[in-house]
Amino acid sequence: MQLITLMFCVSALLCAADWPQFRGINGHGTSLEKKLPSEIGVDKNVVWRTPLPPGHSSPILVGKHIFVTAVEGETLLTIAMDRASGRILWRRQAPRPRQESFQKTNNAAAPSPASDGQRVFVFFGDFGLLAYGLDGEERWRLPLGPFNNVNGHGSSPVVIDGMVILICDQDTGSYLLALDAVTGKVKWKTERAEVTRGYSNPGLWRPKSGPAELVVPGAYQTIGYALETGEKLWWARGMAWQLKGVPVIDGDVAYINSWETGGDTVTPPETPTFQEMLTKYDADKDGTLTPEETGADLKNWYINNDLNFNKRIEERDWLFWRLHRSAQNSVLGIRLGGRGDVTDSHVLWRYRKAQPNVPSPLLYGGALFLVKDGGIATTLDPKTGEVIKQARLPQALERFWSSPVGADGKVYMLSEACKLNVLKAAGEWEVLATSSLDDECFATPAIADGRIYLRTRSALYAFGK
């Protein structure tokens, strides 16, 4: 019910057929569109195809426009296209004062654009935020960073109630930022010292009474903030390290995927306290530990856990290492509306098997859909977290970066090798069709106009019957 209301009331400047941010309105990943194709291919149900420079950002749809970001050589680009024909309308170059490191499966144009219907907002980790009019005229810019995130950025801006909201999680100095969408002026900035690197997008919860809240997943915990002020209201512990994706919010429940390497142990290993480490290794008694002091015992520890790169183990470094060691991978259902630490009072259920790495959950057809690397598709009962069905998708044994989307009674799951499986949208799902494109796919498709807009490494396709 709430989702349908959001589809038509998101903004006076956005219509129900728009897809204005990553995974559409509030990141739900669903659309009311009908008559969508089940099969696609380079010569099957193609309305148009437009070659593009590489980029991992997902397309957004606003009015007559499609927006993506890309990297051409060393140049950061925002590209506007005509929604009907795929024709490129304009390209704008962003400043690039630096080139930060990122994981090889990431891309300097990974965050997706967002729009309020009059402007489009883009974020590059190598610069910061820029705003353009739909005509391509720059409205404002805000340099941000440099950032301390060894994997590069993945969080996308979202637009809510005239504000651009952006999560800037990193190993040191994480924060949540809200800007005036018209002027680019900072409305509030909230430090997030509790978390380290992450790649999530915020979700919005509007309670029946009271002010709106942001639901923000992060390393080791999800936190709720007041939308208007950025005040921290509540938090739920027990998340994994390096969260990705977007929370799915339905009524007063948020569904969040939380997975990272090392969090699948049934019983977390014991880890010494920092004081115990100092007692054992701190030869010069300066309250820190160096590679020379710890020697072969912690030879590889510094690579990922020396958070400020000073070649010393400090108390904060060890604190987050202990959190990492005790992290519990899980998909969670969290009842919203609490205050303070809600871990014991508002976490409804946890599911800890066959979890996605990057793809966000999809709530559609009465079930919560998940897809894991290797093509393992799972449906959960959203009320209990119990498994309804779990099976391997045909012809899709590789990794999954794209999040599932749903419309027309179908769920679309897209693998890195551009294998598209279309499932019947039901707890007891079945595969309706399997298609393939000869390319790589990292972006999440957008749905509107009776079409699926699907970005590969080399092009953007519009597929329709």
Image: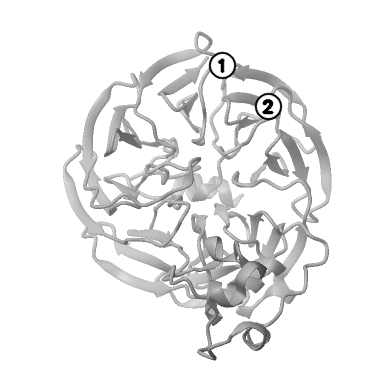
Q: For label 2, count other residues whose C-alpha is less than 10 Å away and answer few (under 14), some (14-19) or many (20+).
A: many
- Viewer-proximal residue, 294 or 448? 294
Q: Quadrant of residue 63?
A: top left
* Kind of element beneath mark 2: loop
Q: Which residue is mark 2?
A: 396
Residue hosting label 1:
40
Chain-order first, disc 2 or disc 1 = 1
For marks 2 and 1, give the one nearer the viewer. 2
Seen from the viewer's position, the closer of residues 108 and 14 is 108
Residue type (three-letter) at the residue carrying disc 1: Ile
Please give the label number shown on residue 403.
none
The answer to whether 373 is drawn above or below residue 83 in the figure is below
User: Looking at the image, can residue 234 be seen?
Assistant: no
387 horizontally vs 307: left or right: right
Q: Residue 325, image x and y in percent?
A: 69, 67
Q: Judge left or right: residue 368 versus residue 74.
A: right
Measured as percent of width and height from the top left, residue 390 is found at 81, 38
Q: Residue furthest top?
A: 43
